[in-house]
Amino acid sequence: MGREPPRGTGLLSPMRLATAVLLIGLLSAATPAASQSTAQRLELLERRVNRITDLTLQLDQVRRENQQLRGEIENLGYEIERLKRKQRDIYLDIDQRLSGSQGGGAASPDTGSSGPGTVPAEAPVVDDRPSAAPLMASGNNAKIKAEYQAAYDLLGTQNRRYDDAARAFAEFLKKYPNDPLAPNAQYWLGEANYVSRQYKTALDAFQTLIARYPDSTKIPGARLKIGYTYYELKNWSAARDTLMQVTKLYPDTTVATKANERLDRIKREGH
């Protein structure tokens, strides 16, 4: 009989050798797979981090752009308000200059707020008083004239205190409803509210003038401004009707010309 190899010589039995080879093969196959999975996970994580970084940068850019847009919007808002104030001032200045020409002489259809004239906006009260009738004793009262002038001056381009002017004219009418200056105060009450974009209040003031002081030389201008006010209130039907009435009541006058201009504008705008 042959001798068995001594133990500890490092030789493996066939079974052990097969098991060892199998384990080595499994380890060899598993190692690249595990390594590849880890690399993929790292790559995916890097892509996600990069994506988050890109999104963060984009968000920061959007925030900066929004801040810039908000600043531009605020500037535009200020500019729009400035232009609105300037437009109201120009409108009122022109209206005051035209109204100043009504002093003296008999009343005619084209006198009043929209008639021609070159009197400065700071025209004295004597140039802005009703011409259809002489001033009564109360109208010659220096205190009454001073109060009217104070209210009128608030509308001037130097003050532009339209809300204060409206309150002053309202107070004047409350105190002196029958004074010869009352019709003019009623008209300017409407104007003060109109330029302040208080259109419903302005409409009521102009309509009150027509109802309460039907002989006032301000009536043609008040009718025209009622048409304008309906336009601002987007009541197109009432605006058209009122302006057409102005053209029929006062043909060949300045108020009729202005009424036709606004009617053309309404037509162009498709209302």
Image (tube, rainbow, N blue to C red):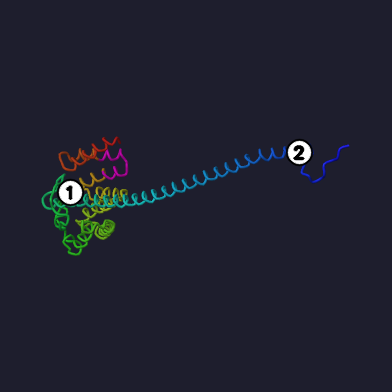
Q: Position of residue 45 (x, y in %)?
A: 55, 45
Name which residue lies at 74% across and 40% down.
20
Residue sticking out furthest to the bottom: 143
Mark 2 element type: helix
Asked if residue 8 lies in the magenta stretch, the reply is no
Badge 1 marks a residue whose secondary structure is loop
How packed mark 2 is, by other alpha carbons closer than 10 Å (few <14, some 14-19, many 20 or more), is few
Taking depth in this image into account, of 144 and 202 the one nearest to the observer is 202
Query: Residue under circle 2?
Result: 17
Which residue position holds label 1?
A: 112
In the rendered view, would you say 203 is above or below 156? above
**Could you tell me the amino acid type at mark 2?**
Leu
Comparing marks 1 and 2, which lies closer to the viewer? Answer: 2
| Residue 186 appears left or right of 100 | right
Q: In the image, what residue occupies the spot 26% across and 40% down?
A: 242
The residue furthest right is 1
> Which quadrant of the figure contains the N terminus?
top right
**224 to the left or right of 234:** left
Q: How many marks?
A: 2
In the image, the segment drawn in magenta is 228-242
In the image, residue 135 lies at what x, y percent? 15, 57
Identify the residue shown where x is 32% and y is 52%.
75
